[in-house]
Image: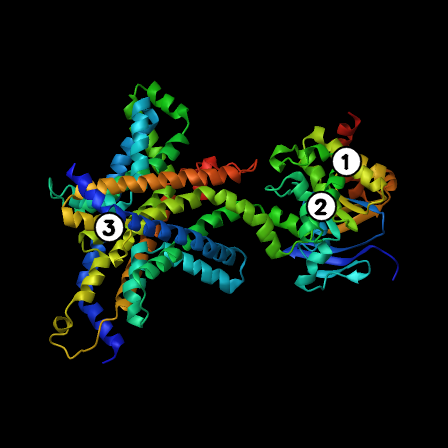
Amino acid sequence: MSEINSNLFFLFKNMPLLLNATLTAILLTFASIFIGMAIGIIITFLRIYGSKITKKIVFAYEWVLKGTPPLIVIFIFYFGLGKYLNLGPFLSAALALGLRSSAYQAQIYRGAVLSITSEQTEAGLSLGLSRAKTFMIIIIPQALRLSLPGFTNEFTIVLKDTPLAYAVGLVEILKAGRDILNQPLTQSITGSDITGTLNPFAIFLVCALLYFLLFEVFSYLLHFLSKKYEIPGFVTDKETK
Amino acid sequence: MMFFSKLVTYIPSLLKGLGITLELTLLSAIIGFFAAIFLVVGVLYGNRFFKILCNFIITIIRGTPMMVQLFLIYFGLPGINIKLSPLTAAVIAFIINSSAYQAEYLKGGFMAISKEQIEAAYSIGLNKWDAIRLIVFPQAFRFAIPALSNEIVYLIQYTSVAYTIGLPELFYISKNFASKTYMNLEIYLFIGIIYLIFIYIITKLTDIVEKKLYIPGFDTSHLK
Amino acid sequence: MEENLLIIENIEKAFGSQKVLDGVSFKLNKGDVKVIVGPSGTGKSTLLRCINLLNPPDKGRIYLQNTEITQLPHSKIPSIRQKIGMVFQHFALFNHLSAIDNVALGLIKVKKMNKTDAYEKAMFELKRVGLDQHKDKYPAQLSGGQKQRVGIARALAMDPLLILFDEPTSALDPELIGEVLQVMQNLAKEGMTMICVTHEMGFAKSVANEVIFMEKGKIVEQGPPLKLFTEATHPRTREFLSKISELYGESEKK
């Protein structure tokens, strides 16, 4: 039987594995983005309203996380802290990518917050809201919308970082690809008369295609959201370009 | 201080690894830059065919993870009988990857230049390519410096991914050290700091380049 | 054929379905100064951009020194453009080059002059527009009036057969208009051939030998400025010129 057929057969046979891996990649992206968002919002608040020292610490935090290779952060969580607490591959990767993303998300939110005039804060305070409440109720809803274009970009960056979790053995798409490749051929073809070798190029092309599909789908969805939640008359620079 | 006494014996290999990391970063940044110019000129000024082709390349590369591209080139290409060494595969993968991102940054710079600039160039008799080379590019490049500087910072971090194909760069050596000594936390924190130092140096260097090339009217501080 | 420097024959230009120029013809002799006026969106700027082939006309012919330039291959177009100077409404100085480099660039890169001669010539042209003191400043460091004078020097440096002025003063603050008009008047008196799209009627009266009134892509009326201002035959011309005089005449008196 032809080589193409055997490749198709293996892919078909491994469909559940690839689909599970795709789901893992999506979950990891969401988990990281969520962690990044939670911390990112806190940092944004501290960076804008904090004391001088707080601002400096937050600045250092952002600078360090933006500058450290994400692989190293993943390894610190997985291997470095492995002695003390066993986080497992998924959580280690989610925390590492999440922390890194928090620094980038903070930058995006800060840009958005700073483009909202101080009058908005004053109006909130004049209603008797506390500073933190004003931030949460008045500023954040506006800032979130304004930062959607930047957020879309960040989301896709995190998505494209998920294969890094391969390094700690998480079965995301790339790992699944390698696993399929490493399956003993005899086992793969039990019960069939298919012979031949797996073409690694075909397998990794499929991996690339899966990532590309995820990238396009999420870009499309987030762009759609950006358009939908655009505040009329409030256009950010990024959108006009 | 067990860690440092063990680290000392590793200094030569760490330095070698650092050399490979920097080599990979610089090669990808520089060759990727020239490839990016080709791509962006293709997208903005090429004929229909080149426009579509260059746009396609940029979209595909920016739409897939760096690591997948690296795997496709190192583990995948042998499937169609092209075998590359880890260094060659990494250099090719990073050049291709970086060129697409740099093209996107340059494109932003190019699009910030008004059409009148080209028309003025035409009006004194410059042809299309001279107008792009002498008038548009020098301005676009200045606008793109902050983004390009960021790209180098990305590159130096992401070259660590090349350890997965067995390239003995800085991260690969650290991983070796960790598996021999079990001092995971120490070595990764230490190497993280080394990366940060180099990123600091690169940022300072690109700041100097930017200052050197500064021209009144080209303020890019808002782009940082 | 007679010795006209430039002949425009029945040119038409459309952008999409909108016809911007609809059969425009005129002739220009050496030393002529023509002023084109008309409501905005009438195709005045498009006319200039047709002449130096930035937007080549769809139909009709243009002759420069009795050579048709509308049918040339792409590769020949730059050599035509260097003979036709252009001054832009928004200056269009090369933002990354100092004033003198703006002027010298064409000399070095197009005329292949050596650098010493090019900078000498550039300096001469900057002096001509009164900006030799500012030669090393970048566009961002110059006022609007100064920028436009550099723009004129840049066009002059190429020793063009004629210069096209596309509303050269309309983007300027009122107090800066005078210095640019002064330079243009001097050029006219030195015998430079010019086509100016402008609403500066004082300028038209003092140096133009013909004013062309355009509307909806057509020439409605043309003639010597005094004749057009005092005894225009077409009612639209009279109406427009009186409106313009109201707007611009005031500032000239001050």
Q: Nearer the viewer, residue B169 or C132?
A: B169
Total numbered circles: 3
Q: Which of the two discs, 2 and 1, labels the residue nearer the N terminus?
A: 2
- Callout 3 crowding tier (Cα within 10 Å): few <14, some 14–19, many ≥20: many
Residue ID at (58%, 52%) = B132
According to the picture, the residue beneath numbered tag 3 turns out to be: B173
According to the picture, the residue beneath numbered tag 1 turns out to be: C181
- The kind of residue on which mark 1 rests is Leu
Question: Does residue A31 show up?
Answer: no
Q: Is C155 positioned to the left or the right of A7 in the image?
A: right
Rendered-image quadrant of the C terminus of chain C: top right
Local secondary structure at mark 2: helix
Distance between mark 3 and mark 2 Cα atoms: 57 Å
Q: Is residue A150 above or below residue A20?
A: above
The image quadrant that residue C232 belongs to is top right
Q: Nearer the viewer, mark 2 or mark 1?
A: 2
Rendered-image quadrant of the N terminus of chain C: bottom right
Chain of the residue displaying label 2 = C
Disc number placed over residue B124 in the picture, else none? none
Distance between mark 2 and mark 1 Cα atoms: 30 Å
Image coords of residue C189 (percent x, y):
85, 40
Q: Nearer the viewer, mark 1 or mark 3?
A: 3
Q: Are marks 3 and 2 on the same chain?
A: no
Residue ID at (21%, 77%) = A196
Chain of the residue displaying label 1 = C
Distance between mark 1 and mark 3 Cα atoms: 71 Å
Q: Are marks 2 and 1 in contact (CB under 8 Å)?
A: no
